[in-house]
Image (cartoon, rainbow, N blue to C red):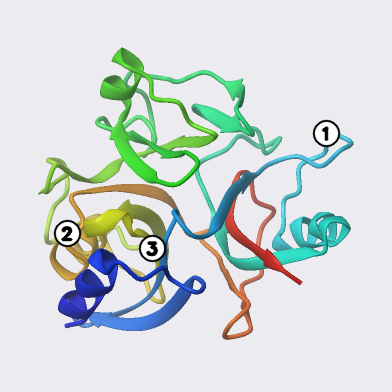
Amino acid sequence: MIRAALVALGVTALPAAAAECEDVSFDGAGFTVCRIDPATEDVRLFLRDEASAPYASFRSVNRALEGEGRTLGVAMNAGMYHTDRSPVGLYVEGGETEREIVTTEGPGNFGLLPNGVLCLSEDRAQVIESRTFAADPPDCTYATQSGPMLVIDGELHPRFLADSDSTFIRNGAGVGPGGTLYLAISNEAVNFHTFGRLFRDELGVQNALYFDGNISRLYDSGSGRHDAGWPMGPIIGTVTED
């Protein structure tokens, strides 16, 4: 298990130099887990370019960042979207709200309540259940809503079944001890129960949010990994100097 080492790093007073990704084996399945310190790293959400066209890919985001002399460090798709790449639920970028929060139950994984919001402020990340968020919205520089929640206050989503045969490549986010933001993706098909337990039991995360399945992709400049696939909607990524 890597939990003890990750928790120790999460609570250390020393700032992280950069986002780090590592391969993890949990419950017989392989995952890649990226550890980010929001207090010391530039973490953003990306949806549209200056012409209001969806970025849709890591490569397009990198082209836009070239103008700042910057590049993506670690990135992944960050929430469910419609066919035109627009977000299904709440989306905030640079303090501007493009899509309001959705708190009603509905079809698909997004509507499998409780769902939740990843909120990024100046120096911290939070995963908050959607109705709790709507009742008392925090200030978020960036926010993306998705669903279902994987872990809620240390408990797995009540609809998850240990023996479910619904398996996909899945990705999501959680916030651990000391405010560490974890981005994780399975490297093989897993069900919700296994993916939720990765965050709760292996990473010690109290609240975690599912981003998507099947189209899930990761970009990691450190290892050279750049997953290809269908065009994406919202993208989360760390930004570093080129």
Q: Residues within 10 Å of mark 2 (few under 14, many from 20)?
A: many
First of labels 1, 3 by sequence position: 1
- Discs 1/3, front: 1
Task: Determine whether, in the image, residue 49 is placed left or right of residue 39.
Answer: right
Q: Residue at x 72, y 68 (%)?
A: 241
Q: Residue at x 55, y 30 (%)?
A: 91
- Identify the disc placed on residue 168: 3
Mark 1 to mark 3: distance in Å?
Answer: 31 Å
> Looking at the picture, which amino acid does disc 2 mark?
Arg
- Identify the disc placed on residue 52: 1
- Identify the disc placed on residue 200: 2
> Looking at the picture, which amino acid does disc 3 mark?
Phe
User: Of helix, strand and loop, which one carries label 1?
Assistant: loop
Question: For this rendering, which residue is in front, 171 or 188?
Answer: 171
Question: For this rendering, which residue is in front, 181 or 211?
Answer: 181
Q: Residues within 10 Å of mark 3 (few under 14, many from 20)?
A: some
Please give the count of numbered marks on the rendered protein.
3
